[in-house]
Amino acid sequence: MNSRECQHVAIIMDGNGRWAKKQGKPRTAGHLVGSDNVRTIAIAANELGVKYLTIFAFSTENWKRSQEEVSYLMGLPDIFFKKYMKEFIQRGYRIHMIGNLDELPTGTRNVLREAEEESKENTGLHLIIAMNYGSQREIVEAANAYAKDVKEGKKQLGINEEEFSSYLMTKDFPPVDLLIRTSGELRISNFLLWQIAYAELCFVEESWPEFTPDLLKKCIEDYHHRDRRFGGVK
Ligand code: IPE
Ligand code: IPE
Ligand code: MG
């Protein structure tokens, strides 16, 4: 029995497109329902004692999709925060963004930055949204920033893992305890490669729009039955 708190849950929200197709709807309809489910699952996570919830909303590879789909996804944060921001503030949630926001359309970037700004005094659930995020890119950027600091004489050569972590976009958050991926795919797709070093993994068959608070609860219960050894012996 693993008694370590499940304080940081990360989710690869997959399967919106396939879910929509099954209903005879366009892929974008799946993204809309999927975005509403972020609210439902954030509330459930908070009630289950999760302190940090990181969700994968758009990857650095998702630009390969049709222009129509990409442009819909870029418009979604506006729809999402118009619907739910007031409630998030009331609930005390703090919104953070990770990813290369500079490459997003200005309107999208502004909406995301505003959500961070508006909620920055909150002390409840940290809801971290990964938008135009790619973990390999993040690690390379961290290495470059460190090299620059060395060159400018601000850092010594030979840092350890903890110091390197402080160059990552996730520097303010603890490591991931539990990683969930919906929709049956058994891969990480360039998400939080460094941060999941010792995370427990949970893959569920249901697509993201079908993922319920009960399924989240089941994943967390499962987590508590895992034996996290961190390389040691029990
Ligand atoms: C996840 O669902 C949402 C994003 C990647 C933006 P998908 O859009 O990947 O849905 P499937 O996997 O094609 O069904
Ligand atoms: C990962 O899902 C990215 C997000 C959930 C935002 P994808 O659907 O893009 O991943 P692949 O292409 O199946 O690996
Ligand atoms: Mg997918």
Image (cartoon, rainbow, N blue to C red):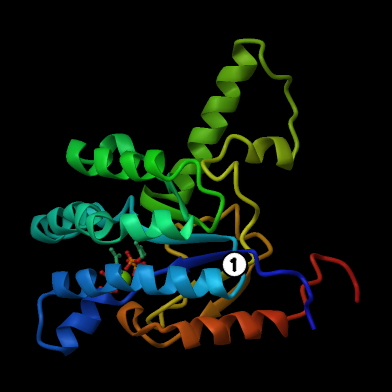
Among the 4 quarters of the image, the one containing residue 227: bottom right
**Left or right: residue 157 compared with residue 186:** right
In percent of width and height, residue 188 lies at: 47, 66
Quadrant assignment for the N terminus: bottom right
For ligand 1, give the image quadrant: bottom left
In percent of width and height, residue 225 lies at: 72, 85
**Left or right: residue 38 compared with residue 52:** left
Give me the residue at 35% from left, 77% from top. Answer: 208
Residue 181 against residue 124 in the figure, above or below: below
Give me the residue at 64% from left, 85% from top. Answer: 222
**Left or right: residue 174 compared with residue 35:** right
Residue at the limit of the structure toward the top, as seen here:
152
Residue at the limit of the structure toward the right, as seen here:
234
Q: What residue type is labelled 1?
A: Val
Among the 4 quarters of the image, the one containing residue 85: bottom left
Among the 4 quarters of the image, the one containing residue 79: bottom left
Give me the residue at 79% from left, 75% from top. Answer: 3
Quadrant assignment for the C terminus: bottom right
Q: What is the crowding at mark 1: few (fewer than 14 residues within 10 Å), some, or many (at least 20)?
A: many
Give me the residue at 49% from left, 55% from top. Answer: 92
**Residue at numbered disc 1:** 50
In percent of width and height, residue 181 lies at: 46, 74
Residue 228 against residue 169 in the figure, above or below: below
